[in-house]
Image (tube, rainbow, N blue to C red):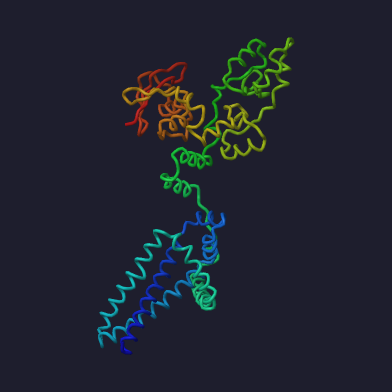
Amino acid sequence: MNPDETSLLILLTSFVILILASAYFSSSETSMMSLNKYRLNHLSRTGHSGARRAKKLLETPDKLIGVILIGNNFVNFLAASIATSIALKVFGNPSPLITALILTMVVLIFAEVTPKTIAALHPEKVAYPSSHVLRILLTILYPAVYLVNTISNALLSVLGISVKENREETQLSPEELRTVVNESTERIPRQRHGMLLNVLDLETVTVNDIMVPRNDITGIDIEDDLEQILQVMSNSQHTRIPIYKGNLDNVVAILHLRNASKFINMANLSKSAILQEAMDPYFIPEFAALHTQLLRFQEKKMRIAIVVDEYGATKGIATLEDILEEIVGEFTTDLASIGEEIHAQDDGKYLIDGTASIRDINRVLGWDLDTDGAKTLNGLLTEILETIPDSSVGINLGKYLAEIIHTKDNVIRTAKIWER
């Protein structure tokens, strides 16, 4: 092999090595910037060495990009010079335009598009190994990186852009987090997916949305005779019952039926003995945020609260189970009782009790009836009609149609609803 051939071989080998180096820098940049920061933080906390190195590099993105661009531009310019030398040796005096076109195609295909595509598709497989070399290069090239970053940061400050402010980690908003959950449906089981969305909804849901309304409260009037009180206790389907004097606006205690065994067989049972086993009532405002109330239940070690309006009148009852039901949804044991209020018909329509909660209807049927105003189906329909309707009245609910089936005592008892 003569000296010219040896020289050409060295140039070709050097050119290939430089193109590979350029591909490395291009893929490193794309992979590092494509890493999922939440997964990166998780892996870093679990001790993954590659994730720790990558996280450390990404804490100063200006330095990371600086070392990558310095390295990439250096090898690209050097590759261009060598390519020119190769062209002169092979073709003598080639057209600069043709040389530039060929070099551009080689760089684009082998040093840009292909490696960046691979890095974008598999960022972790590329970023974690490359973080070894990038950390070493950053140490070696730090003076050059510092100089370049100082000049570029000065230019950015002239434009009113602060690198330090933009370096701060941004937190996901609830809506952004909801989008993340919705886009992860293939990885998250359907039940857990629904639970996560329900947790996010706690910020927008108030106690008023989930409470048992006043009309449905089973309570003990301490002014009744003992026989009536014991009958209420024996017929109650709830473990905790409010005790009031005269009416529900005067709740004086909450009785846990578990404690009833202490006095139920007393020969000289008295009302004072019942009150002695009851606990003081816990009152909460009707528009308290659900996530806040959940924390208050935990802090006070309470499981039931009397919901009152701004005038102190009793609006309903809220329990810890009601809040948990908003989170776990269909896993609740109350789903069967909700289903008793909704009756599917052969024609695809549904007969629904007027007292059914709109939120429960939406949860069971997967609908999106308006929950901003009225809380029950009866309330929703009468709110739209602005009157107490007769039977066989049709109502347009947007995506749904409703027909009043039965009314009694100024209340819609049953309605038929179906999707358009």
204 versus 39 height, above or below: above
Q: Position of residue 35 (x, y in %)?
A: 46, 59
| Residue nearest the viewer, comparing 420 with 107 | 107
User: How many numbered discs, if any?
Assistant: 0
User: In the rendered view of the protein, which quadrant contains the N terminus?
Assistant: bottom left
User: In the rendered view of the protein, which quadrant contains the C terminus?
Assistant: top left
Instruction: Name the residue: 46% across, 71% down.
Output: 68
Residue 355 placement, left or right of 315: left
Q: Position of residue 18 (x, y in %)?
A: 39, 76
In the rendered image, the residue lying farthest to the front is: 1
Instruction: Name the residue: 43% across, 34% down.
Output: 370
Residue 128 placement, left or right of 98: right
**In terms of image quadrants, where is residue 103?**
bottom left
| Residue nearest the viewer, comparing 333 with 415 | 333
| Residue nearest the viewer, comparing 255 with 118 | 118
20 versus 361 height, above or below: below
In the rendered image, the residue lying farthest to the bottom is: 3
Q: Position of residue 391 (x, y in %)?
A: 38, 18
**In terms of image quadrants, where is residue 266?**
top right
